[in-house]
Amino acid sequence: MEKRNTFSGKLGFVLAAAGSAVGLGNLWRFPYLAAKYGGGIFLLVYLLLAVTFGTVLMITEITIGRRTQLSPLAAFGALNRKWKWLGKLATFVPVLIFPYYCLIGGWVTKYTVAMISDGKSTALDTYFNDYVSSTGEPLIWFGIFLAVTVLVVLFGVNNGIEKLSRVLMPMLLVITVALSIYVVTRPGAGDGIKYYLMPDFSSLSFKTFLAALGQLFYSMSLAMGIMITYGSYFSKEEKIVKATHQIEIFDTAIAFLAGLMIIPAVFTFSGGDKGALSTGPSLMFVTLPKVFNSMPAGRFIGALFFFLVLFAALTSSVSILEAIVSGLIDEFGMKRVTATVAVAVYGLVLGAACSFGFGIWSNVTILGFDILDFLDFVSNSVFLPLVGMLTCIMVGFVIKPDIIICEVELNGPFRMKNFYVAMVKWIAPVFIFAILISGILQSFGILKI
């Protein structure tokens, strides 16, 4: 088995973990949900949940990784042999996500180049559908994005993941701040800013809470095995709670700035129509190019925005691949090169099938979903909350919270340990179960959220 590497220090770990957390969920899903669920009130609820649920779940996963020095595939079994199956379940999440995430990364790569070369064409109504329904071109950009992801992981923890994160994450923050300042200073942006920042408590509902809590899993890379994997590379000399807070601040800041950038921009473009902030690919790949096309210097701003999204997608895809590769190394003693190439080939095959699902295989459906949407449903609506809930149950009632607390207290007192115990044993499992049920019902159109 290969010798286990560690990050060079806390900064390297925080930037890499934040890079994993900051992804497509921050840059299009968060603004969409904020617009749909009342703007300022959604933002307030999300922030409250981030410092409670988010903190507890992230501390748990990072601590499991550091205590066991293993990826999730082996870590759960090391804590309790009877619960090794949960490690397999947790590893199954990135296995499902990786192919279609890289395909979407290919879409972002295509749009980045298109914005630089000819920004106006991307604003056409048919541009996105014509592109994704074609057979050859999406595979080329998908292959490029996948190859870069694989190359970074092949270089390992220090020379690949950490070095990439040290470069891209500061750049990502600078671009996000610059774009946000530009957007909020545009004429007509005031109404969008007010809607996004001023809580309207009449819009508060249980659905707002569920949507914000569900977003935590996307935004913070929870229940994907990623934080356990990165935690296994985290030095025993560093403070887990402090690092967790720093990751959360970075991740939440990017999500907040993405909302501040996108909501006022779309409000201005649409004349205040919240419906223009539609869900899924249509926001990023249909609506926003129109917004950029209507702006002064829109081609430059659009290119900068898609560079931002590309950086975020790349750091996340790297973490998803690393979670799988680390598991193969730990469980089967595979070499990093062998494991990475094997997962890359799998990702290429299934990612191509997802791409064909918009074109030549558009008649192929699974439970009414196309191939990509089915993988997204199974991973995000079923396995993410399921793994999160089961992890809380295992920590709370099987291995007991003291295991986590002892590891955290290697570097100082754990001041929130009583709150941690109550959250991980009772509060978090109940509400995560609510996310699981509502997500499944929503996906089949039984519940409207």
Image (cartoon, helix red, strand yellow):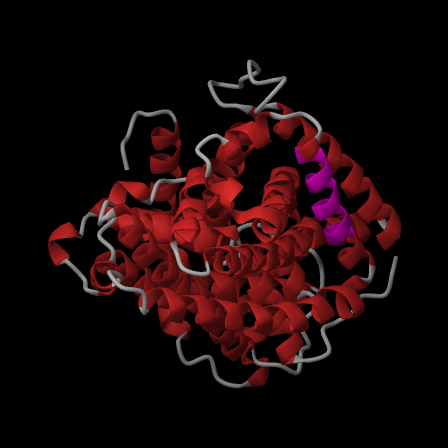
Counting every numbered tag in the picture gives 0
In depth, the one of 85 and 92 nearer the eye is: 92
In this rendering, position of residue 433 left or right of residue 222: left
At x 71% / y 28%, what residue is drawn? 136
Q: Position of residue 99 (x, y in %)?
A: 66, 38
Along the line of sight, the residue nearer the viewer: 382 or 260? 260
Extreme-bottom residue of the structure = 412
**Towards the viewer: 424 or 247:** 247
Q: Residue furthest left?
A: 202
Give whichever of 274, 293 is nearer the camera: 293
Q: Which residues lie in the magenta part? A: 138-150
Residue shown at 33% from the left, 36% from the top: 438
Q: Is residue 292 left or right of residue 247?
A: left
Q: Of helix, strand and loop, which mostly describes the magenta segment?
A: helix
Residue at horizontal 25 percent and vertical 58 percent from the top: 192
Kindly identify the residue that appears in the image at 45 percent across and 44 percent down.
Answer: 385
Residue 352 painted magenta = no
Q: Look at the image and say whether residue 144 sits in the magenta stretch.
A: yes
**Is residue 64 in sight in this rendering?**
yes
Q: Quadrant of residue 95?
A: top right
In which quadrant of the rendered image does the N terminus lie? bottom right
Is residue 30 toward the left or the right of residue 333 in the image?
left
Could you say where residue 155 lies in the image, as x and y percent from the top left? 82, 62
Quarter of the C terminus within the rendering: top left
* Residue 397 can be seen, yes or no: no
